[in-house]
Image (spheres, rainbow, N blue to C red):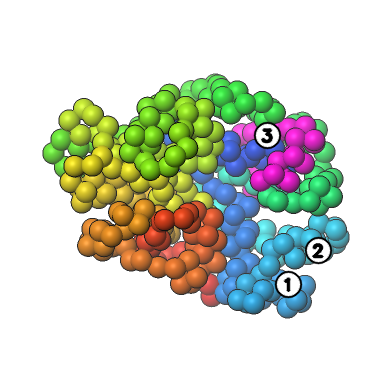
Amino acid sequence: MSIERKKYIIGLTGNIGTGKTVVRKMLERLGAYTIDADGLSHRAIARGAPGYEPVLSTFGKWIIDANGDVNRSKLGNLVFRDQAALAELEKIIHPLVRQAVRVLIERTNGPVIVIEAIKLLEGDLRHLCDSVWVTIAPPALQIERLTRKRNMSRDEALQRVNAQAAQTDKIAAADVVLQNSGSYDDLWGQVSEAWRNNVQARTPTDKPRGVPGPQPDGFSVARGKPGDAETIAQLINRLGHDTHQLTADDVMRQFGEKAYMLLEHNRAFVGIAGWQVENLVVLVTDIHLEPGIDMEVGIETLVREIEHVAADLECEASLAFPSSKLAMQRTIWTQLGYEARSSEGLGVQAWTEAADACMQVDTVLFFKQLRKDRILRPL
């Protein structure tokens, strides 16, 4: 660990479809501050961002959509067929991403930082890292994940897998190798063991980050952990209105994407909210409250605690997706600084994409900007 930085930095990489993002989320649950460098690369070429005009000048305006945003599917289909074109794109993006990563590292007070980057080993980001962790999976499983989760055709998925360096090259550079070909429980076990053996001995990760706000009398909030999966499933089944009944296994699988805040009142669980951070945006979903409790106190207590965590994670905006019933409490949301918006009206491509990915039937989008100084802000 660098004495100057006093921060232990893990570089997390692996080929496409091997589960890097799931591992990053697990490390976030364990207390790390995580940076999605690949997500930052998308923001670097958003409309008005520093890489937007250079990309259009290099590849032409045919890659933009009707809104003027870069169509990443068109751009990806071009560069993954042409190594020279890929090199040109990386020449534009990589310096911007490095700059943004350095800013985020300097900002955070967290003792452990994880940088997820598919091209970590090929660029300068590697030199920032104290340790390199690599996710691996069989090629057949990579292709299956890409077709199932990203709606790629088999040919497109095969092209993406074959366009990358062999996994053996990354394994040779790794301090930790995570085999992601089994269950979620198996991967969580590998990550937890690697955390104990490689991180806890070096850093004071058990110290809480930041100072949580005061809680109303009788109320408390706790972060749900994988060991709470059964409790979380029961709480959502009891308070939610979905006919599908969650199991503890369902919740464990969801821990690869989201975390939960549990609301307790007088030693009984009376509320829950799911949350996740994507591309410096915190997304608040699955908000359920016990009938009869003070709705204003319940919503405010859960949302304030999630915002407290979001501040630690340098989030720029909060997007909440309450049910239409909870959304009717407009005064509560207004007092918390939120306003009802459409995803198209958010004005920032990364925020719009996050909203579209989370919006569900019978939910309403509420928006709050958490900070004005945005990473890779438009020029």
The residue where tag 1 is placed is 63
Residue nearer the viewer, 211 or 325: 325
Instruction: Residue type at mark 1: give it.
Output: Ile
Residue 352: x, y in percent? 51, 64
Question: Distance of mark 2 from mark 1, alpha carbons?
Answer: 10 Å
SS of the residue under disc 2:
helix
SS of the residue under disc 3:
strand
Q: Are marks 3 and 1 in contact (CB under 8 Å)?
A: no
**Label disc, if present, on residue 78 of the rendered structure:** 2
Mark 2 against mark 3, which lies toward the viewer? 2
Q: Is residue 121 visible?
A: no
Position of residue 42 in the picture relative to residue 139 (left or right): left
Neighbours of disc 1 within 10 Å: few (<14), some (14-19), many (20+) = some
User: Which numbered disc, 2 or 3, marks the residue that appears first in the sequence?
Assistant: 2
Q: Are marks 2 and 1 in contact (CB under 8 Å)?
A: yes
Q: Is residue 165 visible?
A: yes
